[in-house]
Image (cartoon, rainbow, N blue to C red):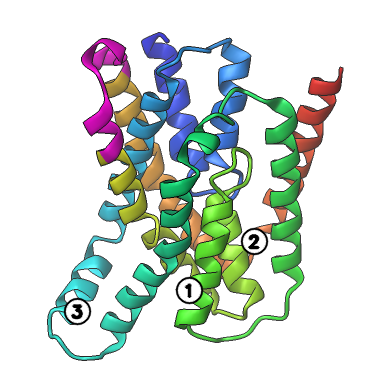
Amino acid sequence: MTIWEAIVLGAIQGLTEFLPVSSSGHLELANYVFGIHEPNNLQFTMAVHAATVLSTIVVFWHELGRLIGGFFRFHMNPETKFIINIFISMIPVAFVGLFFKDQIESLFTSNLLLVGSMLIVTACLLTFSHYAKPRQYAVTPRRAFIIGIAQAVAVLPGLSRSGSTISAGLLQGVKREEVSKFSFLMVLIPILGMNLLEAMKMETGDALPGGVILAGFVTAFVIGALACRWMIRLVNRGKLIWFAVYCAVVGIASVITYLA
């Protein structure tokens, strides 16, 4: 992988991590286009995911400060309830990570059929949530767990994490402002934990060059911060149906390319 390829892949990750079009799916498609099949691609994926986590922290800095401050008052308040729901939402993805990690990693092989199929599923989820009757419910422990299940299933390449979790919340009637914030904050600890485990297992000889990692990381961080703010506005305005069209077109094209 060259530095220019790392910049392009970092930009793709930063943009698609927050837009409901599947960052993992687009990275797999980009690897297919560039012909990148290196065994350490997963390390690069972890690095750019860490960059978008950092961009999330920057965008939600004041909100995170408010939540942490409320939590350490040590009594049940809205901030404490929100954080408890975040931890509840992590249970499904933690289960998948502990027991199915190797099986999931084996799917990241630039498989156009799988990526295309999951993009079509993402398009369906976005369409269903777009036409769901809008309500103004809050995130409860039960709703948080269901959103967490959506996040766990979205580890499949091509199935958008943000699209799945936001759709799961909207289909349950959670108000748009709350589901967008919950969707972006619920991923922080799982990705940081996953990156820590990967770093502990990483062998020096298997690592990509530092310049390649840095180029992808910085690009993903900058683009991610911009995309995160944009996505919040789009969710609040209910403008996700166009992403359903995009995912359907790219998904069908990927499947046709694979079959051809």
2 or 3: mark nearer the eye: 3
- Which quarter of the picture shows residue 45? top left
| Vertical order, 221 against 214 (above or below) | below
Secondary structure under tag 3 reads: helix
Q: Secondary structure at mark 2?
A: loop
Question: Which residue in the rendered view is the most extreme toward the bottom?
Answer: 76
Residue ranking furthest to the front: 99
CA gap, disc 2 and disc 3: 33 Å
The answer to which image quadrant residue 28 occupies is top right
Residue 150: quarter of image: bottom right
Q: Which residues are magenta?
A: 197-212
Q: Which of labels 2 and 1 is toward the front?
A: 1
Whether residue 184 is visible to the viewer of this picture, yes or no, is: yes
Residue 200, given in percent of the width and then of the height, sits at: 22, 32
Q: Main secondary structure of the magenta part?
A: helix
Mark 3 neighbour class, 10 Å CA radius: few under 14, some 14 to 19, many 20 or more = some
Mark 2 vs mark 1, CA separation in Å: 23 Å
Identify the amino acid type marked 2: Lys
Q: Which mark is residue 71?
A: 3
Q: Is residue 20 above or below residue 200?
A: below
Q: Earlier in the sequence, mark 2 or mark 3?
A: 3
Q: Look at the numbered discs 2 and 3 and tell me whether their residues touch, using CB distance below 8 Å.
A: no
Q: Residue at x 52, y 57 (%)?
A: 151
